[in-house]
Image (spheres, grey):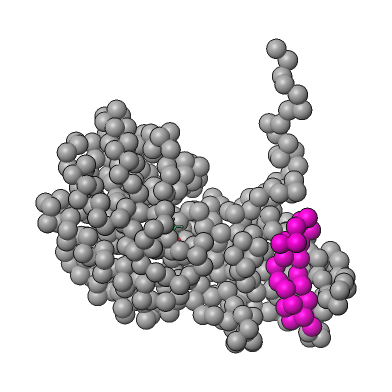
């Protein structure tokens, strides 16, 4: 089946995103996207608050129902807009962060420091010090050297740091190799056979408290088998740690739950729940708090990128639709060959023909679709690229000195600009054409 699928797939995508047609007009959360485009300009990201809430509740229901004390930590790198973070905090989520910048964002959005987990394979000394000072709830270490450094920094600060150890479970996922993180021989996690050294390090110092074991096997995973296999390995590690006399508080199962971008369905939550809930329940019954770290699943479908058609041209037997968003705004197609469904804001029952949708950036890799059947659009019309709520704005850049797009949140039939479009002045700030005068 072609990745773009048909009407049934489109209606599933619309359902996930909270999109519908009022007459010919595309609306998100009850607001006409043309109105948002007119007010905020294009390119612009639009996030539907209710779509985020629905995903949060669906995930809680499917995986965590009946588990006392379980918590979802949102992976901030997927979408770090403060308004989006606030929606998730208000739902009771914690935050999973990978940098000091994300720590500052999580705190600015109102997350309690104790509900922040600091992940990442290469945290700097400076970042670890700041995280200790802020009192983050858990620092997930990924190497013995990091653990040793963390012990020294905690002792210097006179603090006791709550540590999680991210295990490399050596599980294969079948997702894109760039977003597969749980196999042996890649940079993430501590290998199993170093666990006894971890335990020794933690128990000999007084500044570290081992509170959790953690995994995260990759992203956009739509099969349940890798999650089941990973949980089995986690259970084995928990027993190993228990046997050494260390009492853990929590088991952090990671994120990676895949969503629907096109014809391929996202993860089947009910089936995943049926497969993993008994194992999660067993952990909860043994007194462990279950933690999840989803990013993409909570926000990916809830966002879209609005863009305006600048030109339509024929060249080399092809039709190119040149739009005002580029790879600097949405990198996923260029980086992973990722599919984003594209729809027109105004549906007019036009002829459909294959076109390439490309951006203005000076790279042949600057494309959103190749030979995609789309209704014939004209300059000045707007398109929406769906599935742009995760790893979209957060991966955007200023390449070609293009200011980053505005971000808009739709909630309760209203919308507001949650992040203003950057200006060129923002981009030039801090640059000097010559050395400063002595
Ligand atoms: C990126 C990341 C996540 C979230 O991954 P998703 O695929 O967005 O759910 C969770 N945990 C860690 C450690 C990560 O690096």
Residue at x 17% of width, y 58% of height: 240
Can you give x and y, in whole percent of width and height, for residue 154 in the image?
Answer: 29, 34
Q: Nearer the viewer, residue 51 or 149?
A: 149
Quarter occupied by the N terminus: bottom right
- Please, is residue 175 above or below residue 129 in the view? below
Q: Nearer the viewer, residue 6 or 432?
A: 432
> What secondary structure is the magenta-colored segment mainly?
strand
Quarter occupied by the C terminus: top right
| Circle count | 0
Residue at x 32% of width, y 53% of height: 190
- Please, is residue 86 above or below residue 318 in the view? above
- Please, is residue 281 above or below residue 393 in the view? below
Name the quadrant where ligand 1 sits: bottom left
Q: Nearer the viewer, residue 84 or 188?
A: 188
The quarter of the picture where residue 330 lies is bottom right
Left or right of 255? Residue 365 is right
Q: Is residue 370 magenta?
A: yes
Left or right of 383? Residue 131 is left
The residue at the far front in this view is 185
Residue at x 65% of width, y 62% of height: 334
Residue at x 50% of width, y 53% of height: 77
Can you give x and y, in whole percent of width and height, for residue 72 in the image?
Answer: 37, 60
Asked whether residue 383 is in view, the answer is yes
Can you give x and y, in whole percent of width and height, for residue 224 in the image?
Answer: 38, 76
Left or right of 76? Residue 157 is left
The residue at the far top in this view is 438
- Please, is residue 47 above or below residue 341 in the view? above
Task: Please report the bounds of the magenta region as a residue range.
Answer: 353-375
The quarter of the picture where residue 147 lies is top left
Q: Is residue 401 magenta?
A: no
Can you give x and y, in whole percent of width and height, for residue 83 in the image?
Answer: 55, 53
Asked whether residue 10 is in view, the answer is no
């Amino acid at each position: 089946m072609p990745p773009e699928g048909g009407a049934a797939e489109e209606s599933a995508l619309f359902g996930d995103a909270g999109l519908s047609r009022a007459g010919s007009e595309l609306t998100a959360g009850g607001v006409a996207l043309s109105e948002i485009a007119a007010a905020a300009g294009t390119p612009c990201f639009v996030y539907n608050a209710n779509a985020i809430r629905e995903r949060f509740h669906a995930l809680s229901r499917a995986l965590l129902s009946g588990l006392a004390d379980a918590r979802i930590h949102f992976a901030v790198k997927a979408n770090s807009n403060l308004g989006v973070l606030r929606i998730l905090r208000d739902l009771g989520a914690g935050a999973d962060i990978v940098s000091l910048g994300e720590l500052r964002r999580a705190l600015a959005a109102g997350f309690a420091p104790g509900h922040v987990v600091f992940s990442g394979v290469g945290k700097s000394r400076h970042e670890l010090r700041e995280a200790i000072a802020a009192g983050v709830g858990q620092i997930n270490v990924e190497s013995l050297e990091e653990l040793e450094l963390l012990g020294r920094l905690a002792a210097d600060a006179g603090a006791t740091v709550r540590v999680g150890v991210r295990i490399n479970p050596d599980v294969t996922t079948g997702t894109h190799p760039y977003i597969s993180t749980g196999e042996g021989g890649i940079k993430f996690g501590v290998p199993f056979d170093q666990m006894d050294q971890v335990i020794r390090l933690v128990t000999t110092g007084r500044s570290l408290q081992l509170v959790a074991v953690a995994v995260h096997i990759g992203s956009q995973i739509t099969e349940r088998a890798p999650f089941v296999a990973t949980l089995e390995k986690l259970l084995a590690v928990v027993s190993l740690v228990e046997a050494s006399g260390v009492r853990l508080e929590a088991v952090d199962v990671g994120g990676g739950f895949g969503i629907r971008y096109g014809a391929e369905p996202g993860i089947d939550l009910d089936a995943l729940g049926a497969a993993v809930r008994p194992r999660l329940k067993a952990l909860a019954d043994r007194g462990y708090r279950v933690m999840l770290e989803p990013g993409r699943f909570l926000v990916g479908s809830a966002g879209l990128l609005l863009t305006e058609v600048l030109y339509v041209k024929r060249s080399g037997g092809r039709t190119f639709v040149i739009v005002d968003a580029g790879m600097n705004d949405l990198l996923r197609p260029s980086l992973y060959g990722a599919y984003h469904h594209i729809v027109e804001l105004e549906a007019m029952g036009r002829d459909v023909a294959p076109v390439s949708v490309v951006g203005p950036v000076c790279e042949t890799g600057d494309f959103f679709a190749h030979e995609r059947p789309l209704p014939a659009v004209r300059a000045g019309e707007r398109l929406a690229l769906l599935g742009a709520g995760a790893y979209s704005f957060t991966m955007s850049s200023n390449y070609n000195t293009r200011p980053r797009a505005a971000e808009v949140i739709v909630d309760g039939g209203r919308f507001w600009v949650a992040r203003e479009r950057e200006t060129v002045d923002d981009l030039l700030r801090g640059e000097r054409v010559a050395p400063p005068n002595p």
